[in-house]
């Protein structure tokens, strides 16, 4: 095979595997929101976003969702691209375009979900002077999907261009985000689509080859008060590691819409606020801890430092808990019970997330689902019992102590096998 088709085929398989891994949690979250918000509210949100909103507002929301999805998949797609694959007879631009192609494929679950929301929002609305709903056939659904899919794919490509490492980082971010917004707003407006394509072509020319830096960015004096272990964690997370604010913000927005559209008694309203605040903290910590454990596994050499296991757990608690305090700002717009629910659950939840990050491998592989399940149960308890916050605060030190004891039992010298095909390993002499 020629080099370019083989390179594209390799990245297509990478992007497809990442998309398959992301498909299950994305669809599970979509169905969970569908049943949690009820079909009527779900349809209303889809109409407000895709049918009633202004084109640029709709494009901004869609672009931010796709950008968060691209940032989440970028680490998995671009991991190892500075190794043996660079020895192939292909230019640096070809490697970058292939990585953009893989990231675009990895966003397919989010793109598919946005397409479904677009179809629900546009096809369930009433058109014309007749207020009665009109029957829709398969032809109408296919025509609407065919008109929406190209601009969604174009917006996904623009989001992938932003996150794939290349030259002119700030230029790619601002102009790539603008291209994604214009592409997502281009349904029925060819001028937006043409301008988005022109911006993407210009960015493709200016981005140059794929940049995989082997050297660190150097010392950053403003990070030294955090200490060297915290510096490693911050570098492992990077900018894309804080994308947990997006799902937490969706939880806060869903809670605000639920309270606005449902007149409730004062007791039930306070219970919903407390539960919404607690679940927003749990969602943020679950996603951030999952990204942290992917970028910073518990290395054996870090345990040679003169630091106790409790100190390692406490440092991760502070690393995960301090950024979560920013969620208290939008929660105060909902009400002070939501702030109390989030603040009271934060210490115990951060300790639980730090323990999961530093736990055994079989525990770290299920960190997202486990923390989300525990957070949902805690939010339900908080909604039913207003004094549960004092219990969570009292149990936070015991959670830290249990996490430290579990971390001491971790076998850092255990064999950690690389999971890849033998045929894709150039260092393997096996032909089977």
Image: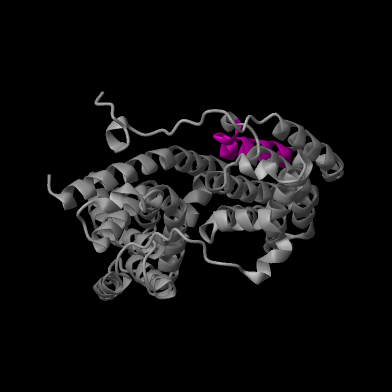
User: Which of 411/19 is in front?
Assistant: 411
The x and y percentages for residue 50 are 40, 61
Which of the 4 quarters of the picture holds residue 46?
bottom left
Residue at image position (68%, 59%) is 323
User: Which of 346/29 is in front?
Assistant: 346
The x and y percentages for residue 305 are 71, 46
Measured along the vertical axis of the image, is residue 388 above or below residue 343?
above
Give the dominant element type of the magenta stretch: helix, strand or loop: helix
Which of the 4 quarters of the picture holds residue 190?
bottom left
Q: Quadrant of the N terminus?
A: top left
Residue at image position (66%, 31%) is 410
Q: Is residue 193 left or right of residue 359?
A: left
User: Which of 236/305 is in front?
Assistant: 305
The reply to whether the magenta stretch includes residue 38 is: no
The reply to whether the magenta stretch includes residue 364 is: yes
Q: Is residue 38 left or right of residue 388?
A: left
Q: Quadrant of the C terminus?
A: top left
Q: Is residue 238 left or right of residue 255?
A: left
User: Which of 246/416 is in front?
Assistant: 416
Measured along the vertical axis of the image, is residue 138 above or below residue 74?
above
**Residue range highlighted in magenta:** 363-380
Residue at image position (53%, 51%) is 41
Residue 58 in view of the camera: yes
The x and y percentages for residue 147 are 25, 59
Q: Is residue 429 left or right of residue 318?
A: left
């Amino acid at each position: 095979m020629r080099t370019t088709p083989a390179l594209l085929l390799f990245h297509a398989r990478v992007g497809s595997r990442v998309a398959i891994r992301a498909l299950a949690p994305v669809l599970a979250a979509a169905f969970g929101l569908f049943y949690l918000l009820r079909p009527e509210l779900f349809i209303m949100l889809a109409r407000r976003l895709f049918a009633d909103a202004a084109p640029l507002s709709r494009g901004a929301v869609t672009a931010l969702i796709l950008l968060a999805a691209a940032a989440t998949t970028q680490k998995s797609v671009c991991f190892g691209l500075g190794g043996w694959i660079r020895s192939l007879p292909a230019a640096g631009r070809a490697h970058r375009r292939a990585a953009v192609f893989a990231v675009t494929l990895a966003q397919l679950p989010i793109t598919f979900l946005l397409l479904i929301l677009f179809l629900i929002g546009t096809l369930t609305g009433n058109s014309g002077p007749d207020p009665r709903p009109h029957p829709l056939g398969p032809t109408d659904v296919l025509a609407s999907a065919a008109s929406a899919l190209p601009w969604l794919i174009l917006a996904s490509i623009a989001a992938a261009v932003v996150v794939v490492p290349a030259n002119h980082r700030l230029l790619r971010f601002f102009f790539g985000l603008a291209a994604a917004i214009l592409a997502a707003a281009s349904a029925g407006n060819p001028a937006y689509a043409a301008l988005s394509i022109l911006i993407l072509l210009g960015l493709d020319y200016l981005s140059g080859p794929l940049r995989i830096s082997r050297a660190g960015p150097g010392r950053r004096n403003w990070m030294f008060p955090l200490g060297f272990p915290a510096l490693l964690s911050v570098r492992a997370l990077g900018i894309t590691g804080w994308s947990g604010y997006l799902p937490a913000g969706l939880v806060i927005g869903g809670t605000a819409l639920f309270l606005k559209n449902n007149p409730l008694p004062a007791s039930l309203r306070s219970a919903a606020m407390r539960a919404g605040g607690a679940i927003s903290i749990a969602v943020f910590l679950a996603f951030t801890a999952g990204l942290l454990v992917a970028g910073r596994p518990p290395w054996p050499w870090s345990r040679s430092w003169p630091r106790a296991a409790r100190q390692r757990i406490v440092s991760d608690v502070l690393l995960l808990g301090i950024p979560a305090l920013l969620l208290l700002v939008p929660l105060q717009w909902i009400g002070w019970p939501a702030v109390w629910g989030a603040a009271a659950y934060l210490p115990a939840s951060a300790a639980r997330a730090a323990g999961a990050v530093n736990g055994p491998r079989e525990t770290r592989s299920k960190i997202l689902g486990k923390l989300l399940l525990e957070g949902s149960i805690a939010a339900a308890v908080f909604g039913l019992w207003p004094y549960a916050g004092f219990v969570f605060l009292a149990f936070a030190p015991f959670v830290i102590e249990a996490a430290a004891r579990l971390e001491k039992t971790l076998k850092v010298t255990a064999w950690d096998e690389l999971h890849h095909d033998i045929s894709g390993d150039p260092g393997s002499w096996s032909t089977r």
